[in-house]
Image (cartoon, rainbow, N blue to C red):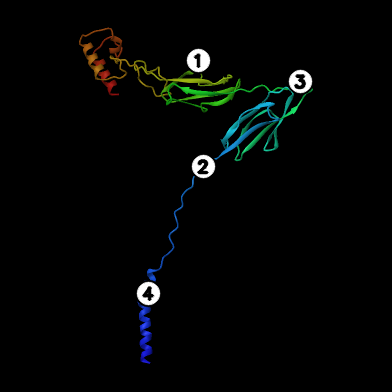
Amino acid sequence: MNNIIRNMMTVMLLLVGSTPALHAQFNPTNPPEPDYEIVEPVKHYKVSISVMPASVAYVTSGGSYTSGYRKYIYTSLTNSKYKFSHWTLNGEFFSANSSFNYTVETADANFVAHYEFNPSSPVEPERVPDIIVSPLYLVTNNGEACSFNQASGNEHEAESWVTLEAFVAKGYEFKGWYQGSTLISSNVRFNYQMPDEAVTLTAKVEKIVFNPTNPSEPDSSQDNVQTTLTGDVNKDGVLNVFDIVSIVNYSLGEADENLPLYDLNGDKAVNVFDIVKIVNLSLE
C-alpha cells in the first residue's frame, strides 16, 4: 500500500514539474497584418473608330481616355459612289448624324461609320463637309495675376463661337485680349469666333499705379500699388533715405529742375513741410 501511494506521489511531482515546459511550447497565432489602403490606378477605356466599307470615307482617330472625357467623333466621305448611313456602337445602332460628341463611359467603345453604295447620282454624291477642329491656347503676361474660365489648349470647331473670360487678381487691371500685337477685345469677357487653325490669345494685365498727390484717381475696388511716386527723386520706385537727403539739400538751396518731385504738398516751395511728408511716406 505504501508503495502505491509513493508511486502516485512520484507521478504527480513529474506532472507538476513538466508544466512550464508545456507552457513554453504554446505559440499563439500571429497578429493579423495591418490593412493598407490600395490605390486603384486611373483606368483608361479604348475608343476605336472605323468605317465600313473600308477606304470609302475618313473618320477621326481613336485612342484611350478616362471615363467622362468628351470626344468629338466625325466622318467625311471620300468616295462619290457612297453615302453616309449611320453609326453603330459595339454593333448596335447609335446615331444617324455624321458627327457627334461622345462622353467616354466605363467600358471600351467600338464605333463604326456605315456607308451605302449609291451609284444613282455619281455626279453629285452626298458629301459631308470637312470639320476642322483646332486648339485655342490662352496665356497671360503675368501668370500669377490672371486665370481663365477654360483650360488652355481646348479644341474647338472652326467658325464656332467661344466665350472667354479672364479673372484678374486684386491690385491689377485688365488691358485687353491680344493675338500677337493686335488687340482683339478690351472686355474681360467676350465671344471669340474660332478660326480654322490653332491660335494663341494673350490676356494682358498691369499693376494699378497710385499717385499720392491725387488720391481720387485710383480704383477704390482694388489694392493700389505705388510704382511712380512724387518724392522719388532717384526714381528707383521706393521712397527712402536717398530721397529724404535730396529734398533736404534742395530746401537748402541746391535747386534743380525737379521741383515737382520735391514739392510734395504742392505749395510751389520746398521746405520743412515737404521734408516731414517725405519722411512719413517713406515710413509707410
Marks 3 and 1, how far apart in space?
48 Å
Q: Position of residue 86 (x, y in %)?
A: 71, 31
Residue type at numbered disc 2: Pro
The residue identified by callout 1 is 183
Of callouts 3 and 4, which one flags the residue occurring earlier in the amino acid sequence?
Answer: 4
- Rendered residue at 49%/47% (across/down): 38
Assign a secondary structure to mark 2: loop
Determine which quarter of the picture holds residue 115.
top right
Assign a secondary structure to mark 4: helix
Neighbour class for label 1 at 10 Å: few (<14), some, many (≥20)?
some
Residue type at numbered disc 3: Pro
The residue identified by callout 4 is 19
Marks 2 and 4, how far apart in space?
55 Å
Residue type at numbered disc 4: Thr
What residue occupies the far bottom of the structure in this picture?
Answer: 1
Marks 1 and 4, how far apart in space?
96 Å
Q: On the rendered image, what quadrant is the N terminus found in?
A: bottom left
Q: Position of residue 121 (x, y in %)?
A: 78, 21
Q: Look at the numbered discs 3 and 1 and tell me whether their residues touch, using CB distance below 8 Å.
A: no
Marks 3 and 2, how far apart in space?
52 Å
Frontmost residue, 244 versus 47: 47
Marks 1 and 2, how far apart in space?
45 Å
**Drawn side of residue 217 relative to residue 247, left or right:** right
Determine which quarter of the picture holds residue 117.
top right
What is the number of the mark on residue 122?
3
Assign a secondary structure to mark 3: loop
Residue mark closest to the camera, 1 vs 2 = 2
